Amino acid sequence: MNDKTAKDDSDLAASLILAETAKDPKLKAHVAEYLDERIALAKAQQEQLKVERERNQREAALHDLHAENLKLRNHALRSQHNQLRAQHQHERLRMVYQGVLSAIALTLLGLIVYAVTSAATDHSVVVNQFQVPPAFDAAGENGTVVASEFLDQLQILKASALTSPDSRNLQGAWNNNIQLQIPDVHVSLGDIRRTLHRWLGHQIEINGEVVQQGKQIAVTVRGTGFAARTFNGAPADLPNLLENAAEYVYVQAER
């Protein structure tokens, strides 16, 4: 039986009931009372459905509000996690930075201690560049070259002599002349080193000059703690003159 048939049967039953109630006043009253009760029940059910619908709407709103609250808490937790991670990275970088600074400070302190100790115990002979006439510069025999030849003669004497183990070291002033660039200033680390060794050490500093006198030349050497001495000869005799000057300086330096 389909819905249409059931509806037709209901309408037919209702028509029969109405027809019978019209004949019997008591039955009509009972039917009217029954219909009032059914109408009141239907209204009560509709009111209950309305209340349940409003309750469901409130529950849905509360659910949405709870979901939004959870979303906000999740966002806050993520932000806190990112902040803690950034703080942790910052602490690590700060520790690394402090470690690097400490290492640099210790290195600088070690270099300073080494420089001061090295300067205080220095007993070397330092040969400065010689002053030479313009003709020597034109021929390639500049002051550094002549001083290097003089230093070579000192090295030969030191190697061939039976000296004590604590004999003086020999070096040229042009060695270790490293330049440190500072804005508008050229600072030579070699100059700083030599200054420390002059203040604290016991160096013998050798200066020399070559003067041309007509067809002859005069090689003069002087040093810390001993008098100057001049050696004369022809320009071709420069190696021999430097050798004689080196012998003089070597004897004076080892006293």
Image (tube, rainbow, N blue to C red):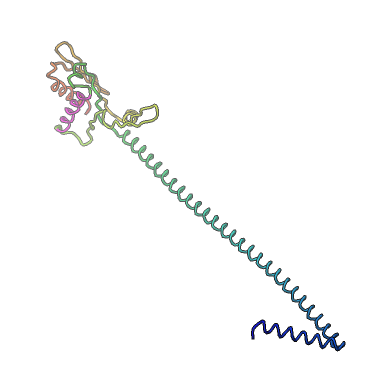
User: Residue at image x 17%, y 29%?
Assistant: 152
Q: Position of residue 131 (x, y in %)?
A: 24, 19
User: Residue at image x 81%, y 83%?
Assistant: 34
For the record, the magenta segment spans 144-159
Q: Quadrant of residue 204?
A: top left
Question: Is 223 on the left or on the right of 153, as rendered?
Answer: right
Residue 18 painted magenta:
no
Question: Is 26 on the left or on the right of 108, as rendered?
Answer: right
Q: Specify whether residue 250 is in view.
A: no
User: Residue at image x 82%, y 85%?
Assistant: 31
Q: Quadrant of the N terminus?
A: bottom right
Give the main secondary structure of the magenta stretch: helix
Q: Quadrant of the C terminus?
A: top left
Residue 146 painted magenta:
yes
Q: Position of residue 129 (x, y in %)?
A: 24, 23
Seen from the viewer's position, the closer of residues 190 and 120 is 190
Q: Specify whether residue 175 is in view.
A: yes
- The extreme right residue here reads 25
Seen from the viewer's position, the closer of residues 41 and 173 is 41
